[in-house]
Amino acid sequence: MKRIAFHNRDTETKEIMDILDAEPSLITFVYGPINSGKTTTISHLLKELPEDYAPFYVNLRGRFITDYEDFLNVLFEIDEEGEIGNVTEYVKSALKDLGAVSGIPIPINLFERIFEKKDKSKDMFKYIEQFFVELSKTRTPILIIDELQVIRDLKIDGLLIYKLFNFFIRLTKELHLAHVFAISSDSLFIEDVHSEAMLEGRCRYLMVDDFDCKTTMDFLNKYGFSNEEKELTWDYCGGKPVCLVELANAKINKKDVESEAKKFLKIITSQILSIFDGIALGKVEYSEKALIDEFKNFEKKELVQYDRANKEKIFLVERNVLFIDPTQRTIKPQSRLNLLAIREVVRNA
Ligand SMILES: Nc1ncnc2c1ncn2[C@@H]1O[C@H](COP(=O)(O)OP(=O)(O)OP(=O)(O)O)[C@@H](O)[C@H]1O
Ligand SMILES: [Mg+2]
């Protein structure tokens, strides 16, 4: 099996390194269209980080989190052998083999103690803070939570997400103790974050978008695409990494790039048309006309400014057809394939 190598994310990497170079002061929300390479960019950067950083990466995707127990289990890496005398001693010993970037190490006896407590969040945050205070004497802690929106509705004695935001503010703006990155592929979650008064002036936004044209061409050059194939790939897939990887694999396997790209477009067009099937079957409450009107915004343009979000726009964002950037009040199809599919649907409407 040939692996497609990680491809240039110099601009985003530099932006993140600049953040890491400075004292932690704001929470960083990393967002962007689906499959734009957010997770890959961060994971790659973490592997290359100098020793003086200690990153903890937690991915909530696909984790079934319904209560504190589930959340604590993903947040922490339970150390079955560890015994807590005091946190200072424990951090020293845990640091020795702090290899892979995953949850925050915690000795089992303390983990169990947190479980017994009524207000688990208080103890959990207290432990992480103490752990980071000790750790920061030698290294800069970085906490990264991917797919944070998974727990947006998790309610245990109030919404957990608010407690987390408060804790993140404490780690960054108040204590300047750790860098905090929250990644999300859900632009409606970023919209909530953006309009959350509690986070105003306490966070920054970092967009990881699909590759630009030059980066895409450099990528395709690596896999021997002809000029014609490069043009066609850009026309169908734009700079969506996941599609480029698929087409590079097709090329490696001597398949026809054009027919593969056309297959992608068929799939996306069919997904959009299935919304209209849903209307016909009474499963979708919007009118076909109202949705087509939204699509018409993209007949000539690839990105539009919105003044007020309406129900139809939000619905199409929920269906991952459109992507909104609440920080700029812009809206665009999730991918070049979505744009082409939208145009085809409008033509045939
Ligand atoms: N810089 C890159 N170089 C090579 N391949 C990449 C790169 N970035 C992303 N990819 C490819 O694209 C796929 C999707 O990337 P990734 O999962 O990082 O996107 P994402 O933005 O985190 O997606 P989601 O919106 O689902 O969270 C990866 O599995 C990888 O194959
Ligand atoms: Mg991701």
Image (cartoon, rainbow, N blue to C red):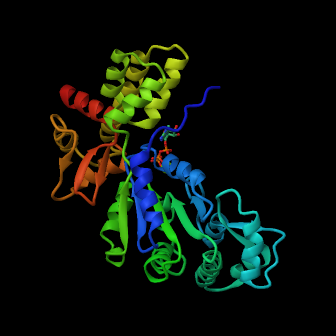
In the rendered image, the vertical position of residue 321 relative to residue 134, given as above or below: above
On the rendered structure, is 215 left or right of 134?
left
Q: Which of 67 and 206 is in front in this view?
A: 206
Residue drawn where x is 43% and y is 26% of the image: 220
On the rendered structure, is 81 left or right of 218?
right
In the rendered image, the vertical position of residue 260 relative to residue 212, given as above or below: above
Residue drawn where x is 27% and y is 35% of the image: 339
Question: Where is residue 169 drawn, in percent x and y?
Answer: 45, 78
Residue 156 position by quadrant: bottom right
Residue 343 position by quadrant: top left
Which image quarter holds the N terminus? Answer: top right
Which image quarter holds the C terminus? Answer: top left
In the rendered image, the vertical position of residue 34 relative to residue 2, given as above or below: below
Residue drawn where x is 59% and y is 63% of the image: 55
Question: Where is residue 102 drawn, in percent x and y?
Answer: 65, 59
On the rendered structure, is 290 left or right of 277?
left
Residue drawn where x is 53% and y is 81% of the image: 157
Q: Please say whether residue 231 is visible from this viewpoint.
A: yes
The residue sitting at the right extreme is: 81
On the rendered structure, is 301 left or right of 139?
left
Q: Which of 332 and 310 is in front in this view?
A: 332
Total number of numbered labels?
Answer: 0
Q: Nearer the viewer, residue 58 or 226?
A: 226
Question: Where is residue 68 drawn, in percent x and y?
Answer: 61, 72
Residue 191 position by quadrant: bottom left
In the rendered image, the vertical position of residue 52 relative to residue 124, given as above or below: above
Q: Please say whether residue 273 is visible from this viewpoint.
A: no
Question: Where is residue 88 drawn, in percent x and y?
Answer: 72, 82
